[in-house]
Image (cartoon, rainbow, N blue to C red):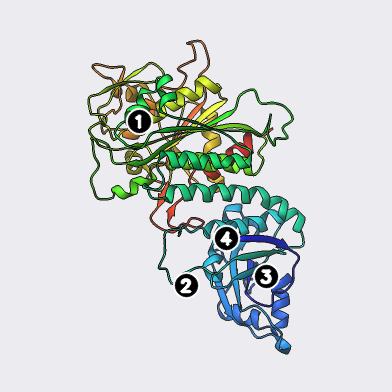
Amino acid sequence: MLDIAFVKPVLPRHGALVLPLVEGSGPEGMNELAGLAQAVDAASGGAVARALAAASFKGRKGQSCTIWAPALEGGASGPSRIVAIGLGKAAELTPEGLEAAGAAALPLVNGEREAVIAAETLAAPQAAAFALGLLLKSYRFDRYRTTEKEEDKPKLERVEVATDATTAAKTAWAPMRAVAEGVFLSRDLVSEPPNILHPEEMAERCQELEKLGLTVEVLGPKEMKKLGMGALLGVAQGSAREPRIVVMQWLGATGNGGKGKKAATKPLAFIGKGVTFDTGGISIKPAAGMEDMKWDMAGAGAVIGLMAALAGRRARVDAVGLVGLVENMPSGDAQRPGDVVKTASGQTVEVINTDAEGRLVLADVIHYCQQRFEPRFMIDLATLTGAIIISLGHEHAGLFSNDDALAQQITAAGKAVGEACWRMPLGEAYDKQLKSDIADMKNVGGRPGGSITAAQFIQRFVNTKNGPMQAPTPWAHLDIAGVAWSSKDLPTVPKGATAFGVRLLDRLVADHYEG
C-alpha cells in the first residue's frame, strides 16, 4: 500500500507535483494559481501558467494537463513533471468527485517514486478524499507475476499531501486509511485463485484479524453437524475441502478499543456467502467462464473487509460478521438434484438445482446468527444470482429488505460512496414459486424473477425465532453478483475485484449506528 503523508507545503525538488485546480468563473476560465501552484509558476518565470493556457486547461471536471520537466530560474532543482487535475466548480465539489480526481492523477504520476499534492486550497477533508481516491486506484494484485518487466511495474511509493492544516487532514485521513485497508483486504481475498483460497485458508486469514482487536471464532463440520446445519453441509459434501463458518466480533461500543457512551444491547450483524469455488455441483456450470467462480465468495470477502475496517478505525459500535465458507464440487459424494436437506431452523428444502447453493449456505448462517446474537439488524451479501445481472446489469446491486428505514439507509450510504443499490420487490406471489411437493420449500422458484425468489428463500430463515406477535428483525439482502468484479477500470476501482459493500456498510455504520 502506498505511503501517504500530510506535510507542510514545500516546493519539491524532484518527483511529481500534482495541482488539483478548480474551475474559475472569470473569462479566462480558471482561477489564479495559489500556494505551491503559484510558487512553481513564479519559479519557472510563468511557464506553468503559459503551459496551462496553451493546453486550454480550465480546471473543468475530468481535465488534466502534464507539464514535463519545467525549467526553474537560476537552475534550481524542481519537479520532473507537474500534473494539473481539474476538479470542476468549487461549489459542486463532492467527496466522490474528489476521489475520482485523485484516482485520475495516479496514472499520470506513476512513473515517479514520489509525488506531492498541492492541496493548500482544499479543506482538510477534501485533501484527504483526493488522497483516498489515488490510494484506492493504486491497488494491484500481482503476487503471482514472476516475469513482469521492471519498466511495466508502477514506480510510485510515497505521496505527500501538502496542506497548511496537517493536523486536521491527518484526523480526517485516519479512518479513511482504515477503510482502504479493509477494501484492499477484500480485493485480495476475491482475487486469490481457488487452489490457494479454499475454506480452511480463508478461515485462517480471518483469524489474522485478531491483531486488530477482533474476536474470531471458527466452526468446523463437527460443530455444524451438532447445530443441525444440513443445508450448508449439503453444499460442502462434494468437496475434499471441509467447510468453515467464521464468526468475527468487534465490540467497539462495549469492549475492546471502543469509546461508546453506553453499551449496545444488540450488535449489528453482517453475513457473507463464501463459496470459494462454485462449479455448480452436479448441476454443473458451462466450462466457458467458470474460472470466474473463484469470486463467488465476494460477499464473505466484503464482510471480512468491513470487519477489518471497523476495527481498524476503532468504530464505536458492536458488530458481528459471519461468513459461511464452502466449496461446491461434483463428486461421488456430492449433493444431488432431488435431495431433501434439513436446515438448522428445522425447515426442509428440496434441492432442485445444486447450483443454487449460496442461499442454502446463507439459510443456516442467518439462522445461527439470529439465534445466537439476536442482532439489531442483519444484512447479508452474496453473489447470489445471474438473474440480478439481467435485471440491473453491472451498475447496481440488488437490494431486498423487510424494513423500509434500513433499505433507505443502505441506499443513501451506497450513493455517498459510489456503490449504488436498487431496491427490488418481495411478495407472497414470488414466495409461492418456492412451493415443494415433498418438502417445506424448493431451493429455486424457476426462471421468472429469479433474483427475487432467491431473496424470498433467504427471508424464510429470518425471524425463525420470533413468535407471531413479535416484530420482525430488520433484514436486508444485497445481491452483488453484477458488481463484485469489474471487467473494466472504474474511477477508483482497477479492473478486477471491487470490494463492493465494504465502503457502503462502513458508511452505513458511521452515519447511523455509532454511539
**Residue 384, image x, y percentages:** 37, 37
User: Distance between the Cα atoms at labels 4 and 2?
Assistant: 22 Å
At label 3, which amino acid type do we have?
A: Asn
Task: Give the label on residue 31, or none.
Answer: 3
Q: Check the image and report above or below for 3 versus 296.
A: below
Identified at 74% across, 30% down, the residue is 261
Q: Is residue 164 above or below residue 41?
A: above
> Pointers 3 and 1 in contact (CB under 8 A)?
no
- The spot of residue 489 in percent (x, y) is 44, 59
Cβ–Cβ under 8 Å for marks 2 and 3 = no
Could you tell whether 8 is left or right of 20 in the image? right
Q: Quadrant of residue 159?
A: bottom right
Q: CA distance from mark 2 to mark 3?
A: 40 Å
- As measured in the structure, the alpha-carbon distance from the residue carrying label 3 to the one carrying label 4 is 24 Å
As drawn, the residue found furthest toward the bottom would be 74
- Kindly report the distance in space between the C-alpha atoms of the residues bearing marks 4 and 1: 37 Å
Three-letter code, disc 4: Leu
